[in-house]
Image (cartoon, rainbow, N blue to C red):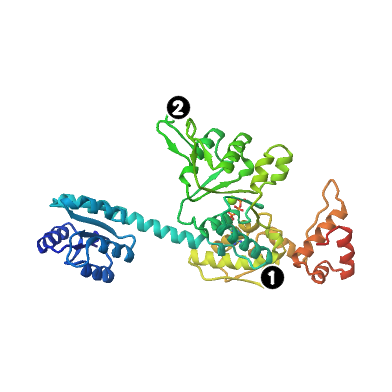
Amino acid sequence: MPKAKVLVIDDEKLVRWSLEQKLSRDGYEVECAASGEEGLDLLRQDGHDVVLLDMRLPGMDGVRVLQEIKKLDREVAVIVVTADTGVARAVECMRLGAHNYLCKPFEFDEVRVELEKAIEEMKLRREVTRLRSQQHRTFDVNNLVGNSPAMQAVRDLVTKIAQSNAATVFIGGENGTGKELAARAIHFDSTRANQPLMDINCSAVSENLFESELFGHERGAFTDAKTAKKGLMELADGGTLLLDEIGDMKLSMQAKLLRVMETRQFRRVGGTKDISVDVRMISMTNKDIEAAVARGEFRQDLYYRLKVISVRMPALREHPADTVLLAQHFLQRFTREFNKPLKRLSPESEDALRRYRWPGNVRELRNTIERIVLLEADEVVLPKHLPPEIQSGMQLGGRTAAELPAEGVKLEDVERDLVRQAVERAGGNQTQAAQLLGIERDALRRRLQKFNLIP
Ligand SMILES: Nc1ncnc2c1ncn2[C@@H]1O[C@H](COP(=O)(O)OP(=O)(O)OP(=O)(O)O)[C@@H](O)[C@H]1O
Ligand SMILES: [Mg+2]
């Protein structure tokens, strides 16, 4: 394989000839053109990695050619070649996206060095573009699977927030409900998609480190600070910063965070200068923040600030109608990923999946399906392939497995909970909910009133 495809555009036959000889000997695949028009034709046909472009050309001049090249392929590296006196114009070319320039007459070694640098950079640029478009696909809002009204509402809200200017967003919800998925969708469906996305886990980093991670530090700010370092806020400038598990953040940091949220200004640790950034901050937690506020573990002012624009990811048991759809989604995904024949769910398995309460939410469902795809050879997923806790609801003929706790129980609470679950599962349809409980519709009505569950 040649090292790279180089296109030489130069009207001097001798220059073309000598570059072609030498570059071919170095292992490049070389094509030559005597004019801008000819060069653009070749580029359109073959696609090159690097162009060596002479500025003084007959017909279309170098600057125009450069503009056309960049229209055809934004990532191709262009090295501009100019006569000594044309430096000002060469600088103009850099502004238009040229990689670098060489002055005539040049040594071949200079060409060689510039070419290698340009190719490295071009490869990196192509890689970044590839990764970005891959991330776009992996993280857009349609990755939040679910047809229930609850999930549709989440997708609508996420899309609205993404396209809004909201600078501070909060996402709450239990473990495994897709908070991170929603946060990434907000970034990748926004105009910030091509800007950096940074994240930090507020519970994993120690308090001291946290501040310098977030705000950076100046040289000598503390013993280990041998050089100045940018923090995540600075690195995320123009883009988005995810603050995961914000419910675990220490009070002293909460105060600093509040200030940044209000002013978008901060100082590096050991610094004296205020730094301004444009960062969308998305915080997430599975903790009950209101309870944390009540206990004095979370600042009320920060909480009020956070909840202005907020998304609540529903627990899977609140939209059980999506369970089978999600299971099928993961079956498809994992059979493809592990190169296995596609599986389907037996009606009994579907029933069991719908009945189970999923304390670990979508993540638990995902892990369950992944395990089945890896370990079970059968083409149909049967109840016996499911973990015992998921099977158990089913073996009891649909009755909820209930065991009287040692300390006893308040029967009314249990009844209230079951009635609420039935209504949820029936999507608010009272006839269906009554059927689920084996009672008449009027009997259900009475209980809804008694338990104050009327929507
Ligand atoms: N609606 C959904 N559609 C498809 N996949 C989902 C959905 N919700 C969650 N997932 C998947 O479930 C897993 C857990 O989701 P995610 O990490 O976003 O949850 P989380 O709310 O951040 O959980 P935690 O609070 O534990 O950090 C991921 O693999 C995610 O892709
Ligand atoms: Mg998470």
Residue type for callout 2: Thr
Residue at the spot x=56%, y=62% of the render?
A: 141
Task: List the residue tagged with mark 2.
Answer: 223
Q: Residues within 10 Å of mark 2 (few under 14, many from 20)?
A: few
Residue at figure coordinates x 87%, y 70% from the top left = 441
- The residue that label 1 is drawn on is 348
Apparent side of residue 193 relative to residue 451 in the rendered image (left or right): left
Residue 382 point in image, percent of width and height: 64, 68
CA gap, disc 2 to disc 1? 63 Å
Q: Which of 437/73 is in front?
A: 73
Dot 2 or dot 1: first in sequence order is 2
Element type where label 1 sits in the image: helix
**Residue 240 vertical position relative to residue 374 in the rendered view, above or below:** above
Q: How many marks?
A: 2
Q: Which circle marks residue 22 in the picture?
A: none
Q: Position of residue 57 (x, y in %)?
A: 18, 63
* Picture coordinates of residue 148, whole percent (x, y): 67, 67
Image vertical order of residue 196 relative to residue 438, above or below: above
Q: Amino acid at mark 1?
A: Glu
Displayed quadrant of residue 38: bottom left
Dividing the image into 4 quarters, which one contains the N terminus? bottom left
Relative to 6, residue 95 above or below: above
Is residue 54 left or right of 151 when viewed as pictured? left
Q: Quadrant of residue 372?
A: bottom right
Q: SS of the residue at dot 2?
A: loop
Q: Residue furthest left?
A: 14
